Amino acid sequence: MSLLKVTIDNLDVEVEPGTTILNAARKIGGRVVPPAMCYYSGLKGTGGKCRTCLVKVSKSSATDPRPMPKLVPSCSTIVQDGMIVQNITSPEVLEARKHIVEILLINHPLDCPICDQAGECDLQNLSYKHGLADTRYEFERRTFEKIDIGRFIQLHMTRCILCYRCVYLADQLTDKRVHGVLFRGDNSEISTFIENVVENDFSGNVIDVCPVGALTDKTFRFKSRVWFTKPYDAHRNCEKCEGKAVLWMSGTDVLRVTGRKNEFGEVEDFICNECRFEKKNTDDWILEGPRNISHSSVISQNLYELINEPPKEPPFNKKD
């Protein structure tokens, strides 16, 4: 199989036929990679909803040098041999991304100070890089009736950007999906017809795939800011899943358990609810070492990587 040569932001890469522009950019890495709020490589059918990954194709292919007339979503556009793509090198793309962020923030509340997702929120990072200082929206934001979807997951529909990730995950990972998108148009919302029904063994993974704070962990709610915790890779023998997770610790206390994410914020191995919600003691896990977090993340600022392992016992004061 012959590889296709693609140029993205003046950088060349060779990829297999059928590769999208987004995944070709991910092969290069760094700032060349467009942001993605709805696409998730491990879930079929995702992408094409948030439009944050728009790019400019200035040359369609080696045989067709014409540019594409409009910006295209990189997550669903297949590369062609000789294609030339502009992401951060295109002022048109950067301007469009600003307006997309403005649209996403129309109904999203600015409650980052109380949101458990703060510090690891994709929308927070996106708005910091591309957002506008002021909003032109003068109408009231959407409001929703609160609904209890289960004992482990907290739903904040006001924060939802309708990326559909949680719906695709429930369709493809769980035995029976019990939540989804109700109604249409600007009345669309993630919800269930019956309360307290999201109880599948793998339902907790909707927390990991949510790019904002719409779905959060009830067992971790308001316990700590994420940058005050120390993430450790750990594993355990589990009959339901691979048992590979990240423990977010404060001293010897395990405050929450999440799946391991790659450099693009996507979970590598989904974990079961038993590992996520019920195994909150270090004795339940085999610690592998500190989690490698990008230096651009606020989580890395507490220098947790300098610590080889968490303390065996809480600190105490010795008396002379």
Image: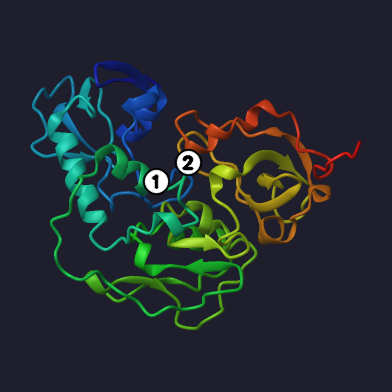
The residue that label 1 is drawn on is 122
212 over 188 or under it: above or below: above
What amino acid type is highlighted by mark number 1?
Asp
- The spot of residue 288 in percent (x, y) is 74, 34
Q: Is residue 137 above or below residue 3?
A: below
Check the image and report above or below for 255 versus 298: below
Secondary structure of residue under mark 1? helix
Q: From the image, which quarter does the C terminus lie in? A: top right
In terms of depth relative to the viewer, which is nearer, 22 or 204?
204
| Percent of width and height locating residue 252 | 76, 46
> Quick check: marks 1 and 2 in contact, CB under 8 Å?
yes
The local secondary structure at tag 2 comes to loop
- Residue at the spot 46% in from the left edge and 78% down from the top edge: 147
Which residue is more in the foreground, 313 or 82?
A: 313
Quadrant including the N terminus: top left
Which residue was labeled with disc 2?
Answer: 265
Nearer-the-camera pick, 306 or 189: 306
Where's residue 197, x and y in %? 56, 77
218 and 315: which one is in front? 315
